[in-house]
Amino acid sequence: MDQGGAPPVFSASAEIDGDHLHVVVAGEVDMATADTMLQAALREPAERITLDLSAVTFFDSAAIHAVIRLAQQFPDRLTVLPSRQVRRVLDISGLSGQSWLKPA
C-alpha cells in the first residue's frame, strides 16, 4: 500500500534529441549520487549537453567536481540550468561567471 511518502532523494534521466543530450536531475546530488549524474550525461554520445538541475535541492563538492568534469569534456557545448540552491553553491565556489551556467 502506497502511503504517499517523500519524493525520491535523487533521480537522473537522459533523453537524446539528435546531437543534443538533455539530462534532468532532481533531489540531492552528493558524494553518493554525483557519479550517477555524471554517467547519465556521458551515457549517450552527444555534441551538446544540457544539464537541468532546476529540481536539485542539495549540491555538494562532489557534484561541483562532476559538473566541472563535464565542462572540461564539453567546452562551449555544455549548458547548466541551476536551481536556486545550485546557483548559490556555484556562486560561493567562485564558478558563477562560467559561460555554461545560466541564470537560476
Image (tube, rainbow, N blue to C red):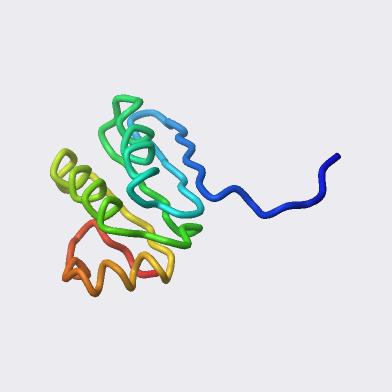
Vertical comparison of 40 with 67: above or below:
above
Give the quarter of the image for residue 86: bottom left
Name above or below for residue 15 compared with residue 87.
Answer: above
Q: For residue 19, what is the image quadrant?
A: top left
Q: For the view shown, which residue lies furthest in the right direction? A: 1
In the shown orientation, is residue 6 left or right of residue 87?
A: right
Res 82 → quadrant: bottom left
Horizontal side of 70 relative to 18 (left or right) equals left
Residue at 46% over, 45% down: 24
Q: Position of residue 44 (x, y in %)?
A: 35, 25
Question: Which quadrant is the N terminus positioned in?
Answer: top right
Q: Is residue 60 above or below residue 36?
A: below
| Residue 100 coordinates in the image, percent (x, y) | 24, 56
What residue lies at 25% left-to-right and 49% top-to-bottom? 67
Whole-percent x and y of residue 84? 42, 71
Identity of the residue drawn at 50% across and 54% down: 27
Residue 49: x percent and y percent? 31, 41
